[in-house]
Image (spheres, grey):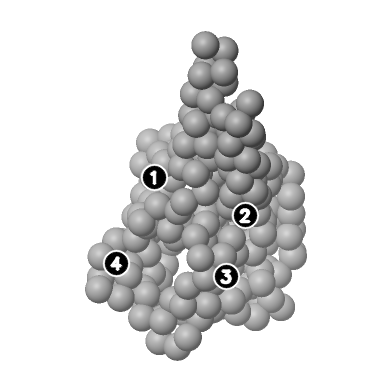
Amino acid sequence: MKQYLQQAILVSIIGVVFAFSVPAQASLVINEIMFNPDAVGDTYGEWMEIYNPGGALDLLNYALKDGAGSYTISSSLVIPAGGYLVFGRNADPAVNGGVPVDLAYGTSLYFGNTGEPLSILAPDTSVVNSVDYGAAGFPAPAGASICFTGSGDNADGANWLAASDLGIAYGAGDFGTPGAANLTTSAVPEPGSLLLIGSGLVGLLRFNRRN
């Protein structure tokens, strides 16, 4: 009886491991938004960060959309597995507050300081991920980005915090983690690590069956 109980527990753990290691259909995540910079004006210092928990993906013909405009990526731009890309109004760190922008969208997008919906659209125009940072529960700091904690639904404001709470500044002094993991997501195991854990549990299960 004890042996069967151990096997049942191991099977449950393996299920949880693979549930976290297999990416969802919508694998791109809006992970960080700077809509109200303080070190520089909004015209230069606004940006958003996308995280890719799935496999490497070419974003050619993907689009970013705000409440009034959109920007389509017109050339090859690969976001690696587990990687980040930063999109901003201006790509020059000398004028944008020191943000390492991977691609500038210029005047195509404008992030309202009181909130609006931001979306990632696939080439077929289907919505991959969407966040309305003006909804109830979202922080609204000045001089700091807002960061998804990496837990739960990123459309829920309760799962976001102000980067000033993390105490991590960049460039000219605004708070944020552009191009890097938010502090609260750094402890989440990478998919490769989870698969290794799962493999080890499978091996243990087979050992128990032989004994």
Q: Kindly identify the residue that appears in the image at 61 percent across and 74 percent down.
A: 101
What type is the residue that disc 4 sits on?
A: Ala
What type is the residue that disc 2 sits on?
A: Gly
Crowdedness near tag 3: few (<14), some (14–19) or many (≥20) residues, C-alpha within 10 Å: some
What type is the residue that disc 1 sits on?
A: Ala
Label 4 or label 2, whichever lies nearer to me, is 2
Label 4 or label 1, whichever lies nearer to me, is 1
Q: Is residue 39 above or below residue 204?
A: below
Comparing 201 with 94, the one in front is 201
Q: Position of residue 119 (x, y in %)?
A: 36, 61
Label 2 or label 3, whichever lies nearer to me, is 2
Residues under numbered marks 4 and 2 in contact, where contact means CB atoms less than 8 Å apart: no
Q: CA distance from mark 4 to mark 3?
A: 29 Å
What type is the residue that disc 3 sits on?
A: Pro
Q: CA distance from mark 4 to mark 1?
A: 19 Å
Residue indicated by mark 2: 192
